[in-house]
Image (cartoon, helix red, strand yellow):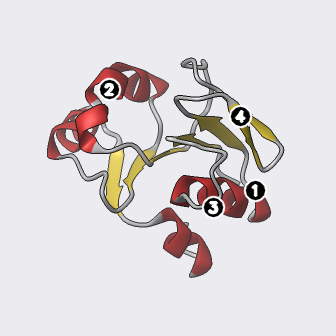
Amino acid sequence: MKKTLVLGATDNPARYAYRAVHQLKQHGHEVVPVGIRKGQVAGLDIRNDRPAAEAVDTVTLYVGPQNQPGWYDYILDLNPKRIIFNPGTENPELEKLAQQRGIETEEACTLVMLSVGQY
């Protein structure tokens, strides 16, 4: 299973990031929820620091491009295998930086990928 860091995690059930954490766990993936506010989602504490996570396969973004630059170094230093840019998070600048480091990027929806078995 793929260790996934969900950036933009929230305890608000109306948000896609909330659903993503639940779905990832239900599919057996290890999840590291990171958000701007403390809380809990799917029984996991939402980290609002920048936790040192090892062996991250995927970073899935739920943070808009205007709020991503402060996260660039953190995301890239995790050296994930891939970054998923969910709808509304597309960012050509971060995609280029990631690709220059050999990190795969996808403009896709984590929830759809999970539901069709292509995660």
- Name the amino acid type tagged 2: Tyr
Other-residue count near label 4 (Cα within 10 Å), few / some / many at <14 / 14–19 / ≥20:
some
Sequence-earlier tag: 2 or 3: 3
- Name the amino acid type tagged 4: Gly
**Which secondary structure, mark 1?**
helix
Mark 3 lies on residue: 19
**Which secondary structure, mark 3?**
helix
Q: Nearer the viewer, mark 4 or mark 1?
A: 4
Q: Which mark is residue 96?
A: none
Sequence-earlier tag: 3 or 4: 3
* 28 horizontally vs 53: left or right: right
Mark 2 lies on residue: 72
- Name the amino acid type tagged 1: Lys
- Is 24 or 2 nearer to us in this picture? 24
Q: Is residue 117 above or below residue 44?
A: below
Q: Are marks 4 and 1 in contact (CB under 8 Å)?
A: no
Q: Could you tell me residue 117's position as x and y percent?
A: 60, 77
Other-residue count near label 2 (Cα within 10 Å), few / some / many at <14 / 14–19 / ≥20:
some
Q: Nearer the viewer, mark 3 or mark 4?
A: 4
Mark 1 lies on residue: 25
Sequence-earlier tag: 1 or 2: 1
Mark 4 lies on residue: 39
Sequence-earlier tag: 4 or 1: 1
Count of marks placed on residues: 4
Q: Could you tell me residue 113's position as x and y percent?
A: 51, 71
